[in-house]
Image: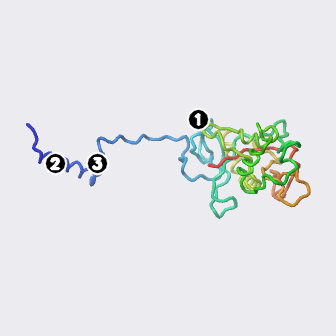
Amino acid sequence: MKKSFKLFLLELCAVFACLAFTGCSNPMTTPEPTVTYIGSKTPTETKAVGDIVFTDGSASPYTEELTDEQKAAAIAVIFYVGDENDTLGAKTLGVGLITERTNCKGLQWCLSDAVAYDSWDYAKNMDDGKANTDEIAGLSDYGDGTKYPAFKFCRDYTAKGFTTNWYLPAYNELKMLYASLTEVGNALNSLDIENPYPTHWYFSSTREYTANKYHNIAMVFYFKDEEYLQHQTCSKDEYRYVCAIHTF
């Protein structure tokens, strides 16, 4: 028996009333799939110093017990989380799990025949290593990076899910990494990575910032104790340890 048009309208109104006022789900709507992340924090959640970042952008505090799968998926450790009033501004920075200290020697900032070697014109930024790294990479003689080993290591650094935009930290970014070294070290130890940042000099991407008569000098940081927090430099063609960082 066919329904009357009036009865059909009444039933249709009842359906819309159910959807609008009683929270009934629309039988025609496909439910959103559940997203499972590697870490306990989603990629958009605020991270904290010492958090371990995974390939999908999620993160977990190093104090959480990690599975073997999580350890295998780790790519970085957060060392700075700031707002616009903080030293480095509103950004979140993480350091890669691999440092370059080949044969306990490290890498050169640049070779002695590089354009930037005896120049005071490049890589002046104290707070933004990405700006310094991009500026060096834009020089006429950068090419494949051979003349700029420290920058090449960082630009070529890759991790699953984050294959680009790694860079050599500016001096104040390196200083912040040192300030968070205890948390970073604890996080790396939880990943079964021991002593990734031994006592040594580390290159920043910042060239000497004072009106020094020598232009072939870059700023470095010594990872040891408070007495070395002051301004330190060395020749750009000397060898120092190098680490790559990334924004998250």
In-front residue for pair 143/158: 143
Task: Give the quadrant of the N terminus.
Answer: top left
Residue at the image point whose x is 80% and y is 37% from the top: 146
* Residue furthest out toward the front: 140
Comparing marks 2 and 1, which lies closer to the viewer?
A: 2
Where does residue 245 sit, x and y in percent of width and height? 70, 46
Q: Which numbered tag is attached to residue 43?
A: none
Q: Which residue is mark 1?
A: 69
Question: What separation in Å lies between label 3 and label 2 (alpha carbons)?
Answer: 19 Å
In-front residue for pair 140/166: 140
The three-letter code of the residue at mark 1 reads Glu
Q: Residues within 10 Å of mark 3 (few under 14, many from 20)?
A: few
The vertical placement of 210 against 113, above or below, is below
Per the image, label 3 sits on a secondary structure element best described as loop
Q: Which residue is mark 2?
A: 9
Where does residue 154 sit, x and y in percent of width and height? 73, 42
Mark nearer the N terminus (3 vs 1)? 3
